[in-house]
Image: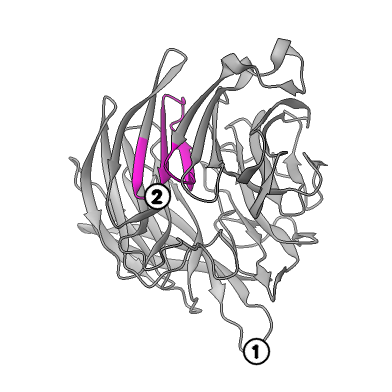
Amino acid sequence: MSIPGPTPQWSVQPFAGLQINSTAISASGSRMITGTSIEGGSSSDFAVYCYAGNGQLLWSDPLGANAYDGVFWVAISADGAWAAAGGSYQQSGSGFLRIYSVDGGAEGGTPGATASPASRQEFTTSGRVNEVEMSADGSSVVAVFEDTVALYTRSGSTYTLASSESFPGAYARTCAISADGTWITAGGNQDDASPTRARRPSGPRRSFSSGTGFVKVFLNQGGSLSVASAWNPTAGVLRVVMTGAFVANANEDGSVQLYFRVMGPVYTLGWTFWPSVPVSYIYALAIGQTNDAVYVAAGGNVPSTNSGPSTGLLFMIQSLPNGAGFTPTQLWSQPLAYAPNPATNMDAAVQYVTAGVGEPHSGSETPGAFYLFGAASGVSPWGSPYETSIMNWAMAINAAGTAIFGGSDDGYVYYWGAPA
């Protein structure tokens, strides 16, 4: 079944005047998680929201009074049973991670009610949670904040902080976990030159610095983290993704790198790749694997030649075995109206790739758009993107390739696909 579009099947504004920074969708598309935020602002109305595939609000969970930034990242297990949300309460020094039993959800079992306290666990972090990801069954959760990578594991229905690794002088922005929870990767800046940890020149969501980067791969052995492989790219790392045997990272210098594991715990650098059209940085990144190849979709900023906003580029890299290594080939590229954000994802069978675009410019936000492309061809089954009044940061596709859950700074979440 193809994804209808580009007009969404339904859209909902969880709370007027707030933004959507992250969305996540279960493998079947029947459960979705999101949260509200304000870029660099405070509100007493931030909350986490859980929806069904038909658009019904299952439950919401307020963050409380006068929180700062709100929900920055969300994740959901492939089976839709567990979810997580992370962000910050204060401008500095206080972050949060909440983990949920999804269908333990609404108070009194009433759809749309506040989340039941029994369905939620909360952990305090030393800074904003920049990303949180879950294994397929939700038994392992990884989060990154400040200089720390933290692993939370579940026994029955109870999560505990099982292990954490801190790297003084580093700033961890991004993480990923394999489906079985055995492998974890994290990336960021090894020596961030900005004491304020500014993540974007005109706002806090994109990270740029003059420091070098880091990528680390961890082995999860019964809840204990150990570093299996580590690298220091010459530029900061904006995104990492993984399948288990393969890890990819996107960098501030406009390059993408792929690492692979043949046997044992050691990963090897397979290649470093620059797209045919030079980009100044790459933030959008997704990885998929078929029987014969690894596919990496990446998107970057194409600098403007005048005073207007920059544009964007999305491209697909096919990586094929070549003796003891792998050879990258750019299959296609597509111009985008604006630079793509971390809204680039692929389904499990590598049928589709998503992209959400838009950026601040001259003190305000550009319009935004949601794109869908065929992963093999680069041709859009939608024919045209779905445009929004301001930028879009989140766009998650389910593993089955039948549903998409996007979020925009206009405060709406959007759903494409058949009801589930």
**Measured from the top left, where is residue 111 in percent x and y?**
76, 19
Question: Magenta region: which residues?
Answer: 125-150
Q: Earlier in the sequence, mark 2 or mark 1?
A: 2
Q: What is the C-alpha distance between the residues marked 2 and 1?
A: 36 Å
Per the image, label 2 sits on a secondary structure element best described as: loop
Would you place residue 225 above or below residue 160 in this image?
Answer: below
What amino acid type is highlighted by mark number 1? Answer: Asn
- Report the residue marked by disc 1: 306
SS type, badge 1: loop
Relative height, residue 56 to residue 85 (above, below)? above
The quarter of the picture where residue 82 lies is top right
Quarter holding residue 218 = top left
Question: What percent of the width, then of the height, locates residue 207?
Answer: 48, 63
- x then y, percent, for residue 400: 59, 36
Report the residue marked by disc 2: 146
Circle 1 Cα neighbour tier, 10 Å, few/some/many (<14 / 14–19 / ≥20): few
Dividing the image into 4 quarters, which one contains the C terminus? top right
